[in-house]
C-alpha cells in the first residue's frame, strides 16, 4: 500500500509505504486546538515507512497523557501534519486531513471522550475511551 499526502499549500509532501497500524479520533483538549474545535483524526504508521519532503515547524509540549509530544506543522500554511511522542519514536501520527485520499483509512475508536464538548458529534458506531486507551 502506498499513501501520499501533504499540506494545504503543498510545501510539505509525504509518501508512506506501509499499512496504517490504527486510526483514532482524539478529543483531548490539545487536539481541539489543532482541529478547530473538533477531534483530530489520527492515522498511526511505522516511522520508517514515512518519507517527508519540505520544511516543518515543531511545537513541543507535554500531553494530558504525560508524554512529551512533538507536533509538526507546515511553516507556510499552518496545516497540522504529524505528531510523535518522545517515548515512541518508532511510530508517527499522520493527520488524516492531509491524506490525498482520506477514504484510504477508517477510524476504529474515539479516545479522550471525557474532554469532548457537550455538542461534539461522537462517532456512535465506534468504541469510546474516556482517556488514553491501552496500547495496541
Ligand atoms: Zn503548507
Ligand atoms: Zn489528542
Image (spheres, rainbow, N blue to C red):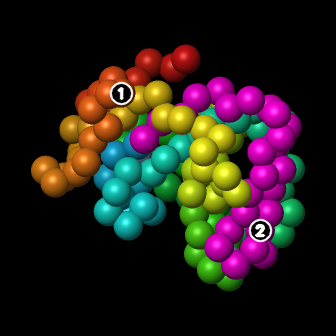
- Secondary structure beneath dot 2 equals loop
- Secondary structure beneath dot 1 equals loop
Observer able to see residue 126: yes
Magenta stretch: residue 66 in it?
no
Badge nearest the viewer, 2 or 1: 1
Residue 45 quadrant: top right
Q: In which quarter of the image is the N terminus?
A: top right
Ligand 1 within 8 angstroms of badge 2 C-beta? yes
- Which quadrant does ligand 1 occupy? bottom right
Stretch in magenta: 1-25
Instruction: For label 2, count other residues whose C-alpha is less than 10 Å away and answer few (under 14), some (14-19) or many (20+).
Output: many
Q: In which quarter of the image is the C terminus?
A: top right
Magenta stretch: residue 18 in it?
yes
Q: Mark 1 points at which residue?
A: 126
- On the picture, is 104 further left or further right than 3? left
Nearer to me, 134 or 68: 134
Give the image location of residue 81, x and y in percent. Answer: 63, 59
Give the image location of residue 88, x and y in percent. Answer: 65, 32
Ligand 2 within 8 angstroms of badge 1 C-beta? no
Give the image location of residue 27, x and y in percent. Answer: 34, 46
- On the picture, is 131 further left or further right than 84? left
Residue 25 quadrant: top left
> Residue at horizontal 75%, vertical 74%?
10
> Residue at horizontal 22%, vertical 38%?
114
Q: Name the residue under label 2.
A: 12
Q: How far apart, in angstroms, are the residues tagged by discs 2 and 1?
A: 31 Å
N-terminal-most mark, 2 or 1: 2
Give the image location of residue 130, x and y in percent. Answer: 26, 30
Amino acid at each position: 500500500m502506498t499513501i501520499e499526502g501533504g499540506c494545504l499549500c503543498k510545501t510539505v509532501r509525504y509518501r508512506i509505504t506501509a499499512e496504517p497500524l490504527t486510526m483514532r479520533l482524539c478529543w483531548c483538549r490539545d487536539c481541539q486546538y489543532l482541529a478547530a474545535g473538533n477531534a483530530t483524526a489520527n492515522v498511526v504508521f511505522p516511522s520508517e515507512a514515512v518519507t517527508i519532503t519540505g520544511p516543518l515547524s515543531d511545537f513541543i509540549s507535554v500531553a494530558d497523557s504525560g508524554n512529551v509530544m512533538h507536533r509538526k506543522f507546515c511553516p507556510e500554511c499552518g496545516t497540522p501534519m504529524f505528531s510523535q511522542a518522545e517515548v515512541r519514536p518508532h511510530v508517527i501520527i499522520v493527520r488524516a486531513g492531509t491524506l490525498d485520499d482520506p477514504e484510504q483509512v477508517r477510524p476504529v475508536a474515539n479516545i479522550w471522550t471525557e474532554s469532548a464538548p457537550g455538542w461534539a458529534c461522537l462517532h456512535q458506531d465506534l468504541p469510546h475511551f474516556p482517556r488514553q486507551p491501552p496500547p495496541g
